Amino acid sequence: IRPLGFRNALIAVPGASCLLFGMLWIGLAVDQTKLDVFLGKKGYSQYLTHHVISYPSPPYSGIEYINEHAPKDSGVVLYGEPRGFYLRRRYRTASDEQTPLLEVWANGASSPEELRRRLKAEGMDYVLINLSEMERRRLWAKVSPPTFLKLAEFWKRYIVREFEVKVYPERWVAVYRVLDENEASRPHDTDLLFVGLLNRFSISQPHGAKVR
């Protein structure tokens, strides 16, 4: 048996170390989901919707719905979720250190009607909300009392829920569509799920102004 030699050892040792580390990383995964994907036992979508320590409160269920059902030219604003990975539509989001765009636009609008016009002007047709991530990180809504009520009224009048998946507390994602004026004038289901969450997490809502 010929010795590796110094040059070959420089190549072989790091390679073997990386291989060993990778095997340990997969083997030590609590539920072995990475290994299941590698072996073909679990699909791409199943893995991305699975809660893991390194990727908590996954938004992929809502992202997958938008990719499959929203028109190609649709725009999506993300709330309570900075991660737009895998979303194959135009989208706007904010980092954890920034005020969410929906709140920024609500603060700048004088009425629910103007807020709807602002979303449309920005090209936003859908709102994806990661309620599980909002609860996990206690993402407080940074809105003034008038803005809180304005946002709640906008939600009742111009928003309809199209999709929701709830495997609490690991995964809770909802997708909402922004109605146009004609749609909003007709009877439609009112969803107060988001407003209820604002009631719980808003740090500046007026005393006694709970929206029901």
Image (cartoon, rainbow, N blue to C red):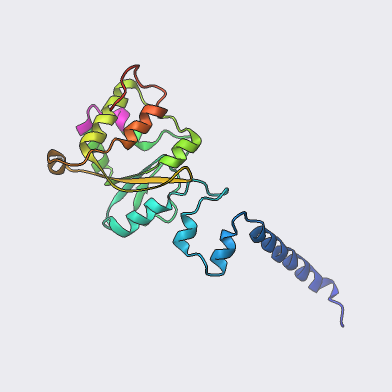
Instruction: In this rendered view, identify the residue nearer to me: 187 or 25.
Output: 187
Relative to 54, does residue 34 appear above or below in the rendering?
below
- Residue 39 at x, y percent in the picture: 56, 69
- Residue 151 at x, y percent in the picture: 29, 30
Does residue 129 appear in this view?
yes
- Residue 101 at x, y percent in the picture: 36, 37
Instruction: In this rendered view, identify the residue nearer to me: 207 or 212.
Output: 212
Q: Quadrant of the C terminus?
A: top left
Relative to 141, does residue 28 appear above or below in the rendering?
below
- Residue 144 at x, y percent in the picture: 35, 22
Direction top: furthest residue: 207
> Is residue 109 highlighted in magenta?
yes
Residue at image location 28% in from the left, 52% down from the top: 74
Magenta region, main secondary structure: helix
> Is residue 57 highlighted in magenta?
no
**Residues rendered magenta in the picture:** 106-113
